[in-house]
Amino acid sequence: MSRVRAASVALVATVLSVTTLAAATEANAAGVRYAALGDSYSAGVGSGSYTSDSGSCSRSTKAYPYLWSAAHAPTAFSFVACSGAKTDDVIANQLGVLNTSTTLVSITIGGNDAGFASTMQTCVLSSDSACLSAVDSAKSYATNTLPGKLANVYGQIKSKAPNAHVVVLGYPHLYKVPGSCIFGISDTKRTAINSAADTLDTVIAKQVANAGFTFKDVRPVFAEHEICGSSSQWLNSTTLPISDSYHPNSSGQAYGYLPSFGAAA
């Protein structure tokens, strides 16, 4: 066989291989039935561009589930994450989209159960000691009560979508400590708030492992992009509307949560 012919055969083989791989990838993507559950961090609160049909759930076209769906065109996409959702709300209002044909599920949940909003309000408006007390209460709830709540919701997800790959994402540190911020709450408060995220993520990771699901820790990818970080901030500080405060902005969704979920999905 001549070198020219050999090269031609090799080129054809390569083209066929790439074509086959592309076709297989498209077929695989076409078979995905994706359900996005959870709270405001999954709904995309803080990133703007909320869909008119989501009402007070504030689901955003810049949220990681929406971005992932737009990029991968799954066969089915059910986006039911909702601002303010707790574990009981997921069970009552979101699990109806799951069934035996669901192949992929994402969720962030647990922060509201532990009192995220009220704790942040206390830390922003009150003294260091009041903030530390609120954080301790949140950590106590996360350690003692939340595990059972998470086990229940994960168990029901598994029951309703037994064939799904379930990806549970954690929560980032809100602050870089010490950071570049001159104004705002003290480093004492910032450190305490971050410690609450650590406790929450530890509890979630353990229950995810018990359920046989996949946990994605987003703290490393958000490093240096927290409030007061040295790089562009992926999280809102106090902002308007107030409900957007202390949530990932559009960059946090696109560069923090999306690649974290994509790597697991």
Image (cartoon, rainbow, N blue to C red):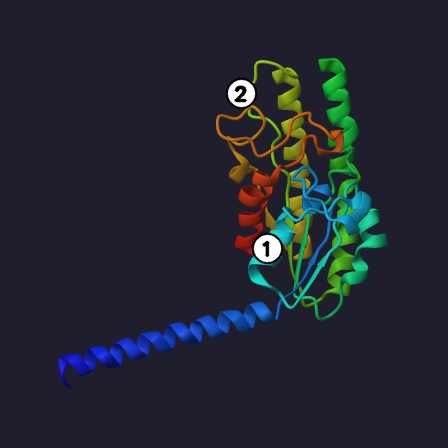
Q: Is residue 104 left or right of residue 243?
A: left
Residue with the mark numbered 1: 68
Tell which of 48 and 145 is nearer to you: 48
**Residue lying furthest bottom in this view?**
1
The quadrant in which the C terminus is found is bottom right
Type of amino acid under label 1: Trp
Residue 151 vs 111, above or below: the answer is below
Q: Is residue 223 left or right of residue 141?
A: left
* CB-based contact (under 8 Å), mark 1 and mark 2: no
Residue depth check, mark 1 versus mark 2: number of the one nearer the observer: 1
Query: Residue 114 placed where, x, y %?
Result: 77, 35
Which residue is drawn at the image coordinates 60% and 52% (left, top)? 67
Tell which of 120 and 150 is nearer to you: 120
Query: Residue 214 placed where, x, y %?
Result: 61, 54
Query: Residue 132 placed where, x, y %?
Result: 72, 20
Residue 225 vs 67, above or below: the answer is above
The quadrant in which the N terminus is found is bottom left
Q: Is residue 87 left or right of residue 198?
A: right
Type of amino acid under label 2: Gly
Residue with the mark numbered 2: 179
Q: Is residue 148 visible?
A: no
Query: Which of the two discs, 1 and 2, labels the residue nearer the N terminus?
Result: 1
